[in-house]
Amino acid sequence: EVGPSTHVETAPTPRALEGERKEVTVMFADVKGSMDMTEHVDPERWRKIMDRFFTLMCEGVESFEGTVNRFTGDGIVAFFGVPTAYEDHAQRACHAALHLREELAQYAYELAKDEGLEFCVRMGLNSGEVVVGAIGDDLHFEYTALGHSVSLGKRIEALAEPDTIYVAQTTASLVSG
């Protein structure tokens, strides 16, 4: 069984900076309709709403040994299986997504009641081989994963209906049973 844990960040190794192949599960999540909501919400209030969303997402991902790779304007990209490799990366990602669905449903209920907002999050999961490492130049670089599996994960998330989790066949086959 996968459960909460403590995560310690370490500096990337020289090999990680060069790039290495890994099997991972990528999670994309974003707030559906955020552009419309920002038209009706004060920018400072919107920042607080999104700050709580990002906190919930980070806590949920990290409690199942995932790593939030980056924040997008209204979402996150997270990886399970890097920088620490886990054979059960797909299960961890699915457990995290299910946990987050419950946490975000409660948050959406509070926002609907208190603010009159329809706050919906969609998630997409995909598993496969990627190359992880630093990209950029000497002054500006980012540790990330690249490859078809990442691109497909983003497309799966974009297809997801509000308040749903779409899982690619590759991920589903790793967690079957």
Image: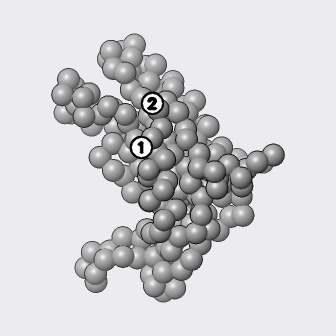
Q: Residue at x 34, y 37 (%)?
A: 50
**Other residues around mark 2 within 10 Å, as few (<14) / some (14–19) / many (≥20):** some
Q: Is residue 49 left or right of residue 103?
A: left
In this figure, which residue is indicated by the disc labeled 2?
A: 162
Coordinates of residue 7 in the picture (x, y in percent): 58, 59
Q: Amino acid at mark 1?
A: Ala
Report helix, strand or loop for mark 1.
helix
Q: Are marks 2 and 1 in contact (CB under 8 Å)?
A: no
**Which quarter of the figure has residue 52?**
top left
Give the answer, above or below, for where 81 lies relative to 96. Answer: below
**Residue 64 seen in this snapshot:** no
| Closer to us: 54 or 147 | 147
Give the answer, above or below, for where 139 lies relative to 122. Answer: below
Q: Amino acid at mark 2?
A: Pro
Coordinates of residue 58 in the picture (x, y in percent): 48, 47
Q: Is residue 146 left or right of residue 4?
A: left
**Other residues around mark 1 within 10 Å, as few (<14) / some (14–19) / many (≥20):** some
Marker disc for residue 158? 1
